[in-house]
Image (cartoon, grey):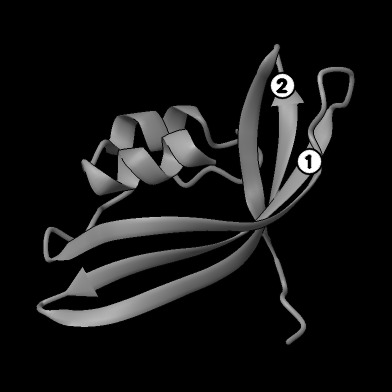
Amino acid sequence: MRSRFSAFAIADAGYLLRTWHPTTRPVRLQLDPHQRWTRLDVVAVGGGGPFETTGTVEFRAHYRHRGVAGLLHEHSRFVRDGGHWCYLGAVPLVE
C-alpha cells in the first residue's frame, strides 16, 4: 500500500499498473498533474501475513488539487499473485 501511495505521489503510472491485478487493471492510467499526494494514514490492516494470499488495507490519503485540500478514504483489497502483492480494488466503506 505504501509503495502504491508513493507511486501516486511521484506520478509513476507504470508502477501502479504493474502492481494492479490483471483482472481489474485498467488498460491505461492517466494521473492528474494538478493533484499532489501529501500524506498517507493507514487506519487498519487485515490479513496479508507471510502465509496468506489476501489482505485488506483501510487508509486515508491526503492530497491537494489546484490548491484545495482533499481526502481519499478507501478500504482496498490485495491478493498475492506470483509472489507479489497486487491491488484488486476498493471495498465499499460503511461509515
Task: Residue 54: give x, y in percent of width and height.
Answer: 82, 36
Crowd class of label 2 (few under 14; some 14 to 19; many from 20; radius 10 Å): some
Compared to 61, does 81 lie above or below?
above
At 66% across and 39% down in the image, what residue appears? Answer: 23
At 47% across and 47% down in the image, what residue appears? Answer: 26
Q: Quadrant of residue 10?
A: top left
The quarter of the image holding the C terminus is bottom right
Q: Which residue is mark 1?
A: 55
Nearest to the observer: residue 86 or residue 62: 62
At 74% across and 25% down in the image, what residue appears? Answer: 80
The three-letter code of the residue at mark 1 reads Gly
The three-letter code of the residue at mark 2 reads Asp
Element type at marker 1?
strand
Residue at far bottom of view = 95
Tell me the number on the disc at residue 81. Answer: 2
| Left or right: where 55 falls relative to 57 | right
Q: Is residue 47 visible to the viewer in this orientation of the structure? A: yes
Residue at far top of view = 83
Nearest to the observer: residue 95 or residue 77: 95
Element type at marker 2?
strand
Task: Residue 71: give x, y in percent of width and height.
Answer: 41, 75
Task: Residue 88: give x, y in percent of width and height.
Answer: 66, 45
Nearest to the observer: residue 43 or residue 21: 43
Q: Is residue 28 visible to the viewer in this orientation of the structure? A: no
| Left or right: where 43 falls relative to 34 | right
Task: Residue 63: give x, y in percent of width and height.
Answer: 29, 67
The mark total stands at 2
